[in-house]
């Protein structure tokens, strides 16, 4: 009679661990973008729905949301949390091109799920703010919670220059003039 073979069973943690680095990076970008949208747009929602009485510092709130998202995901995927940053990483040879669709897809999905989550959290506030109407312009507009719109006095050329200048300053860590997260030991990425 042969001794009964005992199969070693894997723990739940061992069965759930992701083995593919691309899957880890994709999930990380999803999570980072989700964090940025929920916390960042959440701070904007708080400021808009309270008419500035509570949480009037939405710019600081959004900046902290970006920092938290990068800090949470930087060690896995580099914390791009923005398709433009991922594209720049590919353009400057800091990320392989075949990963770009995965990153961008995860970022779009994370942003969409984050916005839907935020809409659910603030549903009652949004409905009572303008009498059940979701407005884009005017005193009771709530669309600026989820998107940015140019001021009426801003020309197309100045809007383009404004956004690109901000992108250069904010995301210079990924551009040709900045230090990439890959060179920082605490935020080292493996992609």
Image: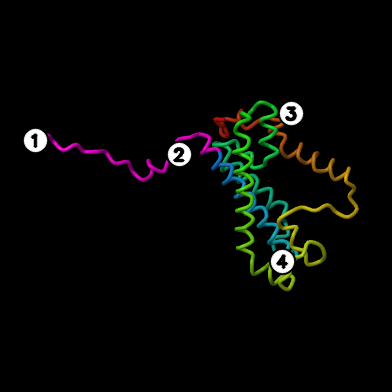
Instruction: Tell me the CA gap for discs 1 and 4.
Output: 77 Å
Q: Is residue 106 left or right of residue 170?
A: left
Q: Secondary structure at mark 2?
A: loop
The answer to whether the residue labelled 3 contacts the one labelled 2, judged by CB atoms less than 8 Å apart, is no
Q: Secondary structure at mark 3?
A: loop
Residue at the (26%, 38%) spot, across then down: 8
Name the mark nearer the viewer: 3 or 2: 2
Callout 2 environment at 10 Å: few (<14), some (14 to 19), or many (20+)? few
- Per the rendering, the mark at residue 177 is 3
Q: Secondary structure at mark 1?
A: loop
Instruction: Tell me the CA gap for discs 3 and 4.
Output: 40 Å
- Above or below: residue 174 compared with residue 144: above
Magenta-colored span: 1-25
Q: Nearer the viewer, residue 73 or 110?
A: 110
Callout 1 environment at 10 Å: few (<14), some (14 to 19), or many (20+)? few
Q: Position of residue 142 (x, y in %)?
A: 74, 62
Residue at the (74%, 60%) spot, across then down: 143
Residue at the (57%, 41%) spot, across then down: 73
Residue projecting furthest to the left:
1
Q: Position of residue 72 (x, y in %)?
A: 56, 43
Which badge, 1 or 2, is on the more N-terminal residue? Answer: 1
Which badge, 4 or 2, is on the more N-terminal residue? Answer: 2
Instruction: Tell me the CA gap for discs 1 and 2.
Output: 40 Å
Q: Is residue 9 left or right of residue 147?
A: left
- Name the residue carrying label 4: 50
- Name the residue carrying label 2: 18
- Per the rendering, the mark at residue 1 is 1
């Amino acid at each position: 009679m042969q001794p009964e073979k005992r199969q070693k069973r894997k723990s739940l943690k061992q069965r759930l661990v992701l083995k593919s680095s691309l899957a880890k990076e994709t999930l990380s970008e999803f999570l980072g973008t989700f964090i940025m949208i929920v916390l960042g747009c959440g701070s904007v929602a708080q400021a808009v729905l309270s008419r500035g009485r509570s949480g009037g510092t939405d710019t600081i709130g959004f900046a902290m949301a970006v920092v938290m998202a990068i800090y949470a995901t930087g060690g896995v995927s580099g914390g791009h949390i923005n398709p433009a940053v991922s594209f720049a990483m590919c353009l400057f040879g800091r990320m392989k091109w075949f990963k770009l669709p995965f990153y961008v897809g995860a970022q779009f999905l994370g942003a969409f799920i984050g916005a839907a989550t935020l809409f659910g959290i603030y549903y009652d506030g949004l409905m009572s703010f303008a009498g059940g109407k979701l407005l884009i312009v005017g005193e009771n507009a709530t669309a600026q919670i989820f998107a940015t719109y140019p001021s009426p006095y801003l020309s197309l050329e100045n809007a383009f220059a404004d956004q690109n200048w901000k992108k250069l300053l904010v995301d210079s860590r990924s551009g040709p003039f900045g230090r990439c997260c890959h060179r920082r030991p605490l935020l080292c990425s493996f992609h």
